Amino acid sequence: MPAGTADDTRLYEVACAQLDRAAAVIDLDPDQYTRLIEPRRSLVVSLPVRMDTGELVNFTGFRVQHTLTMGPTKGGLRFVPDLSLAQCGALAMFMTWKCALLALPFGGAKGGVRCDPAQLSTGEMERITRRYAAEIEPIIGPEQDIPAPDLGTGEREMAWFYDTYSHAVGHAEPACVTGKPQALGGTPGRKEATGLGVVFVLEAALEREGKVPAGQRVAIQGFGNVGAVVAAELHARGAQVVAVSDIGGAVAAPEGIDVPALAGWVREHGSVAGFPGAAAIERDALLEVDCDVLVPAAREGQITAANAPRLRCRLVVEAANGPTTPEADAILAERGIALLPDVLASGGGVTVSYFEWVQGHQKYVWTAEEIRERLRSQLRDAHSRVVEASGQLGVDQRTAALCLAVRRVGEAAQLRAVFP
């Protein structure tokens, strides 16, 4: 896998190290390991786009498909300034394990465009999205690779992607992408699914301790599509959200933040910064706030060997992909801080994307309540299997989750054999 930035290359190394650890625990067959250690397919495309000024600018797009063994691949589209092939490769591998753990018939994928949406007009975003969809059209489709929203993208971009693909194949194809608006065949609750899934997994973990979310002091890094939902859902359940951060700043209130008021402030001002109902703190300080539960819901590589010794929580719930480095994992384990891994805790989005994909094929829509209950059941079942595997194998829950996922994909690869 070609390298990106140093951080991206490091993320890819982390993904490979996680596979190595799981492979050692389950004694993975060397042939299976060979088929899983590198992405099956990687595509880099150049996107010439006419800007509002009339200037023609080339953007770079990526799509990485980690394994084709389990069925079509599945994964989000990121529109961020630092996107690289290495970053997409790591995140595609994470997606493979997530889908396998949740028993979804997908391999992992990830892609997007290296750009800054904050610096682009609506028209420019549309032209970039449509050009990207057209360029990767040969390797995507409802039975090949189904994109979804990720950082910098949402329902709007998925609608453009869906329309572009449908024009290319000559008919409306709602199953080609998930995370669409409901008017175009989207699923009720898809936007909230990842955050809601985090809460369902946390509830299951607390239940095993004889506890409930009410009264838990929670700090949340990130107040976007995931973190804001986690905050709202936990607040509604009686938890105290004691600190929140986003790209603009961070605020804290030991007695608990009024989350609905904070959400209103963010809608009006664009950031949690300046919220009058809490005290301002440094963004990096959020990870070290005194709390019961810490929820990193921003980006990868946030909890490191440098700050892990200063965390003051008893449980980390990974709502983002890859927020904890292996070195930090070891430090948290030594300190007795439990962790619900991303491969499990952040699986709500892809699970509801699966429901939307199925609905796209069946031309049938489930209700929001049906989606919610199906999601809850799927994640609680996965959590139970991870806890059981952790005890049987004598490993932490991240390793247990990866062992279950890698074993499932490895077995499928072995059964399909090598062609020709």
Image: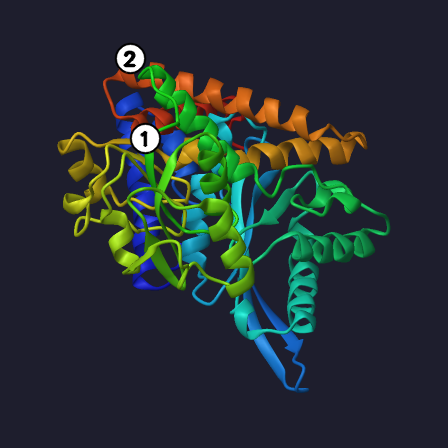
- Residue at 64% over, 74% down: 121
The image's mark for residue 282 is none
Identity of the residue furthest to the bottom in this view: 54
| Visible residue check, residue 420 | no
Quadrant position of the N terminus in the picture? bottom left
Left or right: 62 with respect to 281?
right
Look at 44% across and 42% down and name the residue there.
93
CA gap, disc 2 and disc 1? 14 Å
In the rendered image, which residue does mark 1 sit on? Answer: 398
Q: Secondary structure at mark 2?
A: helix
The image position of residue 402, as x and y in percent, is 36, 29
Seen as rendered, the residue at the extreme right is 170
Of residue 118 and residue 109, the one placed in the foreground of this image is 118
* Quadrant containing the C terminus in the rendered view: top right
Percent from the top left, x then y, of residue 17?
28, 41
Residue 294 makes an appearance in the image: yes
In the picture of the structure, the residue carrying the numbered disc 2 is: 392
How many neighbours does mark 1 have within 10 angstroms: few (below 14), some (14-19), or many (20 or more)?
many
- Which residue is more in the foreground, 110 or 217? 217
**With 142 as the anchor, is 324 left or right in this view?**
left
Q: Nearer the N terminus, badge 2 or badge 1?
A: 2
The residue sitting at 81% across, 33% down in the picture is 363
- Does residue 311 appear left or right of residue 90 in this picture? left
Question: Splitting the image into 4 quarters, where does residue 404 fall?
Answer: top left
Residue drawn at the location 68% of the way across and 46% of the way down: 177
Q: Position of residue 138 (x, y in %)?
A: 68, 53
